[in-house]
Image: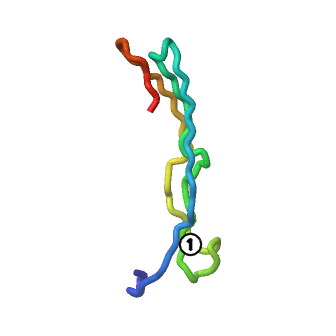
């Protein structure tokens, strides 16, 4: 609804995110080390607007979607006689 109480169609542009991780096991498969990144495309804001107010790239504004690209590292271990299993 707009300020005049009329129904108004709006849009949010499409977007894609991708994550990647690399995992390595060692020490008789009892330890693992992973590194990776989330949001590889560094999506932070996407375009928004009102239908009929011009082209998809004119007017409107942006909507925050994510904090941007992040990186991580993980170290895991199995205690006891069990080996790590892939799922």
Q: Which quadrant is the C terminus positioned in?
A: top left
**Residue 86 percent location from the top left of the image:** 46, 29
**Residue 63 percent location from the top left of the image:** 51, 62
What residue is drawn where x is 52% and y is 27%? Answer: 34
Is residue 84 or residue 20 the one in the foreground?
84
What residue is drawn where x is 57% and y is 39%? Answer: 20
9 left or right of 57?
left
* Element class at badge 1: loop
Residue annotated with mark 1: 60
The vertical placement of 85 against 79, above or below, is: below
The vertical placement of 37 against 23, above or below, is: below
What residue is drawn where x is 61% and y is 49%? Answer: 41
**Residue 78 percent location from the top left of the image:** 39, 18
54 left or right of 12?
right
**Residue 31 percent location from the top left of the image:** 47, 18
What residue is drawn where x is 37% and y is 12%? Answer: 81
Is residue 29 or residue 6 the one in the foreground?
29
Q: Residue furthest left?
A: 80
Q: Which quadrant is the N terminus positioned in?
A: bottom left
Q: How crowded is mark 1: few (under 14 residues within 10 Å), some or many (20 or more)?
A: some
């Amino acid at each position: 609804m707009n300020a005049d109480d009329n129904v108004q169609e709006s849009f949010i542009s499409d977007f894609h995110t991708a994550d990647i991780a690399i995992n390595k096991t060692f020490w008789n498969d009892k330890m693992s080390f992973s590194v990776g990144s989330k949001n590889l495309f560094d999506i932070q804001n996407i375009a928004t607007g009102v239908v009929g107010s011009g082209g998809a790239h004119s007017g409107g504004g942006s909507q925050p979607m994510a904090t941007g690209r992040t990186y991580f590292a993980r170290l895991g271990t199995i205690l006891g006689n069990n080996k790590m299993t892939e799922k």
